[in-house]
Amino acid sequence: MAESFMTLPEIEHAARNVLRREVWDFGKGGAETETTLRRNRRALRRLAIRQRVLVDVRRIDLGTTFAGMPLPMPVAVAPIGSLGLFHPEGDLEMARGVGLSGNLAVVSGVTGWPIETVAKEANGPLLFQLYHFGDRSWVKELLGRVEASGYRAVCLTVDTPVYGRRERDLRGRFDGRFARADSPNPLPPDPTYPARLNWEDVGWLRSIVSVPLCLKGILTPEDARLAVEAGVRIVWVSNHGGRQLDHAQATIDVLPEIVDAVAGRAEIVIDGGFSRGADVIKAVALGAKVVAIGRTALWGLAAAGAAGVDRTLKLLREEMETALALCGQTRIRELRPDLIRRVEY
């Protein structure tokens, strides 16, 4: 079934047809007026790619490296909570699907399955998203399991001191956070703990992990500078897919100033509305090392499980290869900011 999909919108349409309305809204929606959600897409549409011609584009190289790992393309699947709502085997099936092509997956800190089990199902590299939902002893024990399971980096999510007001869910009287698959994992000990975090906690985390530390949820150059000064090796530019602060800036709009602030001292990941191959090209040209996709992969999971995720990534790869060839570029690692222009339509 999955191989019959020829375009990414087809996969999204198929997912909508199989999901309950409240689950679709949980995956699709954003905070309050959903201004940030729409702004992410509008900002990407306002960027044009300069087209060069008469270049030999018979061979397109999408390969890159990230956190010391070779990757087949500069794309990761972002962490998504409550995947059990979208497929009976949720995080396990997502890890299987991403791993079929050796791509990078980021496992949610609220996965409904043991982190060790998810790691065993993945053929590709994994990062772990940390929600700091407990005291330091709780976090230290969890991260010990993470490192022992082979995860390649730890990404502390810093943009959820409180849970955003997601009005689609509120209107439907639906809370997807607690509609998780049966699992031996207990609920987090203290979901309010992130409200007390500060930069001292970042320093402590850096001292206890041997893998690279990432901060996910950076939107200003000021915080990017503080991150690299604290020893953070991966800065993740994110507005949580428009699901936290309404009326936040689009991530692609703040990317150039964060790249300048980091000044090569850390690698940069970005998410926020990226759903097509051309979107990835724009972000990489502007300085991102990896682009994380969320909803796009989620629809593949809902539509056809691991095969649907794999098909989604293959179609995204085809879009990237086609767009690069048509704009006269052959190696994605060599893209530069002058490839991109801002337009008003």
Image (cartoon, grey):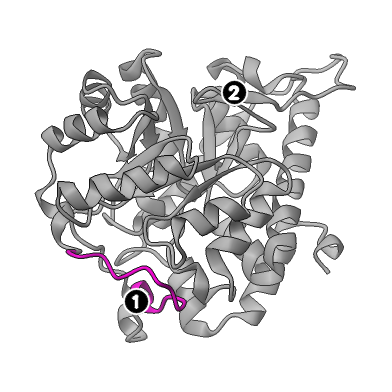
Q: Do the residues labelled 2 and 1 touch (CB within 8 Å)?
A: no
Q: Please identify the quarter of the rendering in which residue 92 is found.
A: bottom right
Residue 191: where, in percent of width, then height? 20, 64
Q: Where is residue 33 in the image (x, y as percent from the top left)?
A: 32, 65
Which quadrant does the C terminus fall into? top right
- The residue shown at (69%, 61%) is 306
Residue 209 occupies quadrant: top left
Asked if the magenta segment contains residue 188, the reply would be yes
**Does the image show residue 309?**
yes
Disc number at residue 293? none
Magenta range is 176-190
Query: Considering only vertical position in the picture, is 17 above or below 245?
Result: below
Q: In which quarter of the image is the N terminus?
A: bottom right
In this rendering, the count of numbered labels is 2
Image position, residue 50 (x, y; %): 66, 23
Q: Which of marks 2 and 1 is nearer the N terminus?
A: 2
Q: Nearer the viewer, residue 319 or 113?
A: 113
> In the rendered view, does 91 fall on the left or right side of 253?
right
Amino acid type shown at disc 1: Phe
Q: In this view, does 235 lie to the left or right of 43?
A: left
Q: Mark 1 points at which residue?
A: 178
Identify residue type, mark 2.
Answer: Thr
Answer with left or right where residue 269 lies relative to residue 279.
Answer: left
Compute the Cα span from label 2 to label 1. Answer: 36 Å
Label 2 sits on residue:
65
What residue is shown at x 57% (from left), y 16% (from top)?
Answer: 336
